Amino acid sequence: MEILIDAFQYGFFIRAFVVGLALAVVYALLGNFVVLREEIVIGHTIANVVFLGVALSLLFSWNQSWVMVASAILGVFFILYLKKNSRFSQNSVLEMTAQIAIATGIVVLAQLTGYRNITGFLFGNILAISNSDVWLTSAVFLFNMVVLFLIRRPLTQLVINRDLAIAAGNKVERINFIFLVLLALTVAAGIKIIGVVLLGAFLVIPANTAKNLAKSFRQMVGFSVGISLLAVIIGLFFSYLFDTPSGAMIVLILGVILVLTNLFRKII
């Protein structure tokens, strides 16, 4: 217990804790819609696009946070452009965008002189969270909560039945665009603590675990938020204790919760 209390004596852990809890809520909320829309790959795709932004910021010494946000939003426009102006399936568009982005990012990183440690961006690193990241995440959290509250009904209708959503007079394309922007901002804010490689798991595991337990959409939302928060709290403490990447530890805890809840569901 003393070791856990000791963790809060360090500014880096407090920053990671605040950022982690805020992201846990937003990722869980967005994850429910991602899972129900069956767009599991999209988090992975945007994360790869943000990785390209990280590479560019390192090469040109640009402000990292703003470049990550800009690259995420540009990635959304690129995805929507391909979906509208090609014959590719949605999954193909997402996967091709992801691979193009990661390949370009690798090429950009190859131009850097000297050693650059990007492990933290790949797997998460609580030491990398700065005060500016806390402010960025807080802004993303508030923006997401307000916008999700405003579009909750049309977005839910769109997820349940697209045709009924259109018949109800909802502007489907606009709602879809807003949702993707919210997702892009959240992915950009979560790269440093979760990492590019594991971010998709943090988006879909809480929602799928909750879906396995819930009897209604409201329950699914509540369970997913609780599971996400629990995983972040335990994962960050374990990451601090064992000096492991924060994203990997959080996703590992999510995996344990997934297995345990599945076993519990079968017993009852």
Image (spheres, helix red, strand yellow):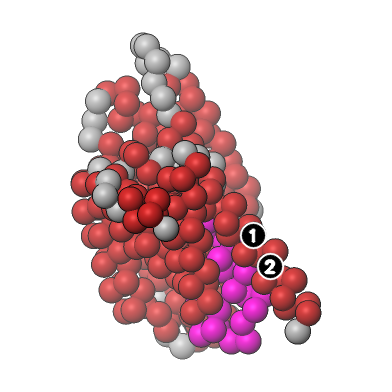
Residue 31 in picture, x, y percent from top left:
51, 65
Asked whether the beta carbons under mark 1 and mark 2 sit within 8 Å of each other, the answer is yes
The answer to whether one can see residue 170 in this image is: no
Residue 233 visible? The answer is: yes
Q: Position of residue 80 (x, y in %)?
A: 46, 54
Say which residue appears at 75% left-offset and 84% top-offset. Answer: 268
Residue at disc 2, secondary structure: helix
Identity of the residue furthest to the front in this view: 2
Q: Mark 1 to mark 2: distance in Å? A: 6 Å
Residue 98, numbered label: none
What is the magenta range?
A: 201-221
Q: Quadrant of the N terminus?
A: bottom left
Crowdedness near tag 1: few (<14), some (14–19) or many (≥20) residues, C-alpha within 10 Å: few
On the rendered structure, is 255 left or right of 82? right
Q: Residues within 10 Å of mark 2 (few under 14, many from 20)?
A: few
The picture quadrant where one finds residue 39 is: bottom right
Mark 1 is on which residue type?
A: Val
Instruction: Tell me, for residue 256, which label it has, or none.
Output: 1
Which residue is under mark 2? 260
**Height in image: 174 above or below 39?**
below
Query: Does residue 112 show up magenta in the picture?
Result: no
Q: Residue at x 40, y 15 (%)?
A: 115
Magenta segment, principal secondary structure?
A: helix
The quarter holding residue 35 reads bottom right
Q: Between residues 61 and 122, which one lies in front from this camera angle? A: 122
Q: Amino acid at mark 2?
A: Leu
